[in-house]
Image (cartoon, coloured by chain):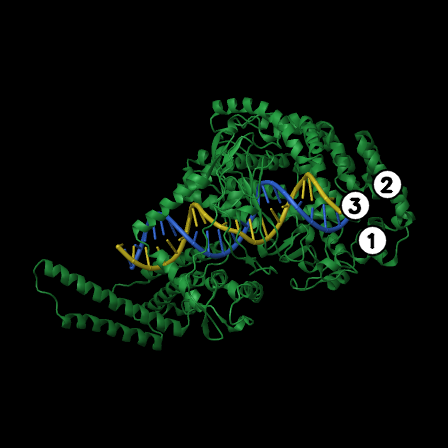
Chain colours: A green, B blue, C yellow
Amino acid sequence: MSSDSEDMPLARRKEQKRANNISTDDDKIDSGSDSDTPLGKRKRPPVRKRVLDDDDDDNDDNQTLSSSDSGAPSKKRTRPAAKRKSYKDDSSESDGEGDYQGSSDSDVPLAKKKAADTKAKTKTNGSAKTNGSNGSSRSKAAPKYKDDSSSSDSDAPLAKKAASKKTSTATKTKVKSEPVSASSKSKQSSTATKKRGKDEADDKSKVKKIKKEDEDDKGKIKKVKKEEEDEEGTDAWWLNQKENEDESVKWTSLKHNGVYFPPDYVPHGIKMKYDGKPITLDPAVEEVAGFFGALLFTEHAENPTFQENFFKDFQKIAKKHKTSPEITSFKKCDFTPMYEYYQNEREKRKNMTKEQKEAAKEEKAILDEKYGVCYLDGRKEKVGNYRIEPPGLFRGRGKHPKTGCLKKRVLPSQVTLNLSKDAPVPLAPAGHKWGAIVHDDTKTWLATWKENVNDSTKYVFLAAGSSLKGQSDLKKFETARALKKEIEWIRRGYMADLKDKKMFIRQRSTAMYLIDRLALRAGNEKGEDEADTVGCCSLRFEHVTLEKPNIMHLDFLGKDSIRYQKSVEVDDQVFKNIRLFKREPAQEGDDLFDRLKTSELNKHLQNLMKGLTAKVFRTYNASFTFQDQLEKLTPKDGSVAEKLLAYNRANREVAILCNHQRAVSKGHAGQIGKIEDKVRAYKYQKMKQKKIILSLEPKLKKKRPELLEPESDLEDSWIEEHEEQLMEKERERIKAKFEKDNEKRKANKEKPMTAGELKDMLKEVDVRAKELAKERKTGVVPAPRGSTVEKCNAQILKLDERIAATRLALTDKEENKQTALGTSKINYIDPRISAAWCEKHKVPLDKIFTKTLRDKFKWAMTVDDDWEF
DNA sequence: AAGTATACTTAGGAACGTGGGG
DNA sequence: CCCCACGTTCCTAAGTATACTT
């Protein structure tokens, strides 16, 4: 169905964008009913009426806000049951939409819907019809844009935009080294690609295996050509991007050595205790007990769900192996002996001798050599995760219901290998057979298996630095760059749609707003046995609270159960919309975007721009922000260090945008405390200086009252402690000096100083300590010889500076402590921005990218210094 | 049209290595 | 030289997106 419009040439599609924007496939039903039923005529249920009224003229904020304001995100999970609000539930959309816009739809229920459906079908057959239907709804919808930046503005610019866009593409994109980049490729050959895609689809719908044989012939022909080309082009695939390549075919030849299985379990015979007594375990049971034992005292092992899940599986396996006594109570289990054993092992590993470490390295190298590489189209490429995941306890994040479950050992018979037909099938481990061997050249994986806990599929892929990954990385960023060129009108489009009459469109545009401006993830639906986390489309009522006039507070758990907690000013209309979505039968646990699914959103986005999906906005905004910030922050003629600081700040900006967080390290509080102490020490010195001034010049009390003010955060008890420490340090220093001096004397054959002399020196410290105690008591600090007010003032100034600098470092550290820069650097920021920047500012690349990253991004390293995202 | 399966990217934490100060 | 704070690499979970199935 979505294929319809796609077949038209790109230019045409661009002209249509606006229309699509207003009314896409998704809402054909509504558009039908809509245009048939003028707004005025609609009767709507009283409740709804209020909603609409409210919405159109924006009063009664209080009512709304107070009614919908709920606290922090709740743990309650009503989700599956309460997915749909009552008003949308019944006869589905038509009713729901009707509710919102008036009752039009309730006038036009099923029968009409069917008609609309047929319409839709016809539509599918020809793009002309698409135009028609879109056109009608467009004329209907057009007035909407008037209050916006004038309807013509949003209508005409579109076509114009498309045109101008093209030129700009041609001229602006001066990417010398990759002239045939994804974007241009897609433009030029979009039709062709599509057709090929269709053929493919047909093939697939037949029998896969047959298809493969069919295609293999084609493949072979291609292969010959390709290999030739590759030989000439060396490994730099990005230099000779082929134009008309079929994207779905990933390779023509693939050879590898299979996967590495973790070694069999070696029993250690350590006995856990049950009910206080050591018990003998079958190796299989011992292994599982060990999994838990090794985790003892970690957060996982303390987590009740983890314990429960583990214990269930543990009991099962214990029973299977006739463990006696029968294990029935988790509380009676004592895994500490195992814990100690593994602690000890860890210790041993740490204390390995050089030779042992060398041997281990050697062993790893052997595996790497065998499994770590493969041959893709004759090219040697690195394999990523060639190790089959070892058994263990599933470490689900956040409140994953299955966390702690036993992840079983994977057998060769469960593993499917993917390689080319002419490649030798690697030998399965002795006594074992592979699950299956396939030759699917449309897939990039080398091996796959099913994991038992969540029944999810695992894969062995090529490494990040491989050509396949590099190509798709390039493609990803090219799509993001394509979005950059379209973003303006896309934004205008969804801003206009925020006021659409159809609830669905409103939700969709509001979601687009959030995804674009806040870099939220799409938010696919999730199942019951996963952690309760959300993204944009799956936000629930309790995750959003509103504050007049236009502040939105977001507080929810996102991917990996990372908390997203931000308050942002949003567009007024967005504010109103959210308020509207939060309204009425809605309660906690209900979806905020109750009619929107990520699939629908993405379908719409595809219509706006080829390759556009929700996640592209994140990539685009991350890269764009980075380039922007980098430009602003980089000092034109600063040192490399200063430039790096700017780079990292820009990086951090992006990380914050994307909400990339990391756990605060355990030493953090202590480190912060130390820095705070440093600040306090400065303050202490400042205080002393001030008092010295007063001793020197008591008259200043009136002139400079600030001299009397105590330093903040400096408590008497702290001062006393601090001074004690100072004295202690002084003593240490003296002792150390004493010893050093004596050694020197010995070497010079002089007479050493006596212990008595040392004692005398130390006594001076005691005297000083007494002085300080007195100063504490009286609050008077006598001026040391030679001190002047001027000197003290200078000191104070210096101290103020230091305090400020240290405080800054503190803030910096504090913020950085929970912000992870790596994720955005690796996944979101177009590496060509960094490469160009390094070039331009003469910063060595390895200050920015580690070896692995340089490898991963090698395709991006050849850009000019004026390359632009 | 929803549910399910698949394939791939994105993610944070643990393990590992390193380098620079005591 | 050792320790430890730190950055890098490894690991695999948790997302997105789309194709397939019912």
Amino acid type, mark 2: Ala
Helix, strand or loop at label 2? It is helix
**Do discs 2 and 3 belong to a common subunit?**
yes
Helix, strand or loop at label 3? It is loop
Disc 1 or disc 2, which is closer to the eye?
Answer: 2
Q: Earlier in the sequence, mark 1 or mark 2?
A: 1
Q: Can residue A23 be seen here?
A: no
Image x and y of residue A654, in percent: 54, 46
**Residue bearing the label numbered 3:** A500
**Residue bearing the label numbered 2:** A116
Compute the Cα span from label 1 to label 3.
12 Å
Say if A687 sits above or below A159 in the image: below
Left or right placement of residue A650 versus residue A45 in this view: left
**Which residue is more in the foreground, C3 or A217?**
A217
**Do discs 1 and 2 belong to a common subunit?**
yes
Labelled disc at residue A87: none
Residue A803, by quadrant, is bottom left
Image x and y of residue A88, in percent: 81, 54
Question: Quarter of the image containing the C terminus of chain A?
Answer: top right
Residue A362, by quadrant, is top left
**Residue bearing the label numbered 1:** A52
